[in-house]
Image (spheres, helix red, strand yellow):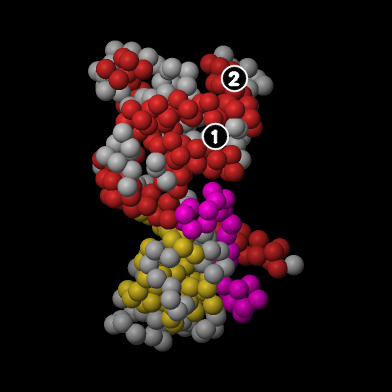
Amino acid sequence: MQRSAFWSKVLVLSLLLSTVTPTLSSHLDLAHATVNNQLNPTPSSQPMKYTQAERKELFERISLLSGIPWTYLAAVDQYEKTMNAVRKRKTVHLGMTNIEFSESAWVGVLNPDPQDTNLKSVAFFHGLGRDGSGDGMADRTNDLDVLATMAAILSKNGTRIENLHINLWQYYQNARSVDRIRQFAAIYESLGTLEANEHAFPLPISADYSYRSTWGDSRGWGGHRTHEGTDLFAHYGVPVRSTCYGIVEIKGWNPYGGWRIGIRDLNNIYHYYAHLSGFQKNIKINDIVKPGQTLGWVGSSGYGKPGTSGKFPPHLHFGLYRDNGSTEWSYDPYPSLRRWEREDRIKNK
Ligand SMILES: [Zn+2]
């Protein structure tokens, strides 16, 4: 799509939002009111909450105008949310978007006015800031302006999928970021919703199993040096189930983990399952999985060449890893396991 065509359509966005979507536009008015309240803080100022359905609707509208699939807009937004969480970054936004631009990126590095909202001078200084709300200003604290700006970045060299990936790479300068956003978009595409926060315990709670907190132990079963997970002991053949909505990132043999599978969820958490006796037929890399879906079965594979098995008692090694955009680190899955187990008990009642 041509740039000018895109921007004439962005203007239509504000009309659409004010006429077709009364709920959303009333939220937007309130959002502006809240921004003003934050400038003059009063004890009663409360951040607005948006439902996931409202947020999806907004992504779909911007998609219609920009040609970028809503799944990619949602994926970039979600990726930024996970990065804000690991960097413990507070945003100025009010719940519709998690994307935030720095002042200098927004107004242009050489712009003498870091709060500039004038479209002409922002463009003159090569600032990224755009107007998506239709008020003629580029306001980096306005959710619609921020989303319109991201849409412009994503459509820079065209909106076909391969171009999108190039645009993403140019913006983030990081192949991992592009991978994550591609994965998140695939999950949204398959689920058709932003609501995917449910979890499940990795074993059926009706099965015979036992586990305790063993994360960080100097020695785990199956040759892990520092134990980056929790061992759940169970009989051979007990189903191993996905703990989350996610995408299969890794599947196959690893000398320590044996037959193992790794799932990436929408919080950018990597769920790792090792020592399986085998995989559910047909499951492959890039498949989208749901909580409770069978991935494979408990076994004792690992600690040797492909197919090695029986060097330790059968168990599921379960690990969780966080990602800050450049590195990944293990954290204790035990509290999550206890929570998912409790939740499954309630569901099964
Ligand atoms: Zn283990």
Q: Give the amino acid at mark 2.
A: Ala
Q: Please name whichever residue, 285 or 216, is drawn nearer the observer in this view of the structure.
A: 285
| Up/down of 64 relative to 17, above or below | below
Q: Position of residue 259 (x, y in %)?
A: 38, 77
Question: Which residue is disc 2 drawn over?
Answer: 33
Question: Which residue is disc 1 drawn over?
Answer: 95
Pointers 1 and 2 in contact (C-beta within 8 Å) = no
Q: Position of residue 301 (x, y in %)?
A: 39, 81
Question: How many neighbours does mark 1 have within 10 angstroms: few (below 14), some (14-19), or many (20 or more)?
Answer: some
Q: Please name whichever residue, 249 or 57, is drawn nearer the observer in this view of the structure.
A: 57
Q: Position of residue 96 (x, y in %)?
A: 53, 35
Looking at the image, which residue is at 33% across and 37% down?
1
Count of residue discs: 2
Quarter of the image for residue 269 reads bottom left
Quarter of the image for residue 228 reads bottom left
Label 2 sits on a secondary structure element that is helix
Q: Please name whichever residue, 29 or 155, is drawn nearer the observer in this view of the structure.
A: 155
Predominant secondary structure in magenta? loop
**Ligand 1 within 8 A of label 1's CB?**
no
Judge whether residue 129 can be spotted in this image. yes
Residue 289 falls inside the magenta stretch: no
